[in-house]
Image (tube, helix red, strand yellow):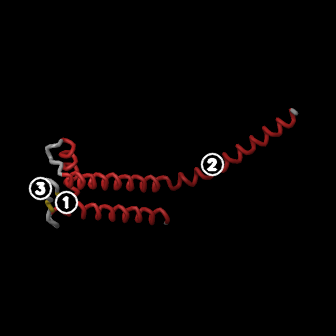
């Protein structure tokens, strides 16, 4: 009975040693790609956050929330540099209540930011594969 327990313990120890050996190989592969991998994650996270903030601006403008609201004012202030080059391309559409605005320039900024983010991720991926 004791021999069976010893054999089963030895087998378990071997499995742990084998799996540790396998993970060691995988860790080396991950370490080799870690800088580019983390760069891709950072760029992707940056563009996801930027797109969400600009989309939130579009939604707040459409709902008619004015600059006097502290949160909306801060959001408009943060997103202004991203959206400003595109605001004069399209007229702002006012709706019935005269407080709801659809900014075409903000929507164009969203589309261009999305495309630029995807392009940057693809370029990083090309660098990674070389």
**Number of marks in the rendered image:** 3
Quadrant occupied by the N terminus: top right
Q: Which residue is mark 3?
A: 98
Give SS at disc 3.
loop
The residue sitting at 11% across, 55% down in the picture is 98
In this view, 100 is above or below 10: below
Q: Which residue is mark 1?
A: 102
Q: Residues within 10 Å of mark 1 (few under 14, many from 20)?
A: many
Of badges 2 and 1, the one in the foreground is 1
In this view, 15 is above or below 3: below
The residue sitting at 14% across, 60% down in the picture is 94
Q: Quadrant of residue 36?
A: bottom left
Q: Position of residue 37 (x, y in %)?
A: 47, 55
Q: Residues within 10 Å of mark 2 (few under 14, many from 20)?
A: few
Q: Are marks 3 and 2 in contact (CB under 8 Å)?
A: no
Q: Which mark is residue 24?
A: 2
Of badges 3 and 1, the one in the foreground is 3
Q: CA distance from mark 3 to mark 1?
A: 11 Å
Q: Position of residue 71 (x, y in %)?
A: 21, 43
């Amino acid at each position: 009975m004791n021999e069976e327990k010893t054999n089963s313990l030895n087998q378990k120890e071997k499995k742990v040693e084998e799996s540790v050996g396998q993970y060691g190989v995988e860790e080396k592969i991950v370490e080799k790609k870690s800088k580019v991998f983390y760069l891709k994650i950072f760029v992707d996270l940056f563009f996801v956050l930027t797109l969400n903030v600009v989309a939130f601006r579009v939604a707040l403008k459409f709902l008619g929330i004015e600059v006097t609201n502290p949160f909306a004012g801060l959001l408009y202030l943060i997103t202004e540099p991203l959206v400003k080059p595109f605001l004069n391309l399209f007229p702002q559409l006012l709706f019935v209540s005269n407080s709801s605005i659809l900014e075409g320039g903000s929507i164009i900024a969203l589309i261009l930011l999305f495309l630029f983010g995807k392009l940057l991720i693809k370029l990083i991926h090309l660098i990674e594969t070389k």
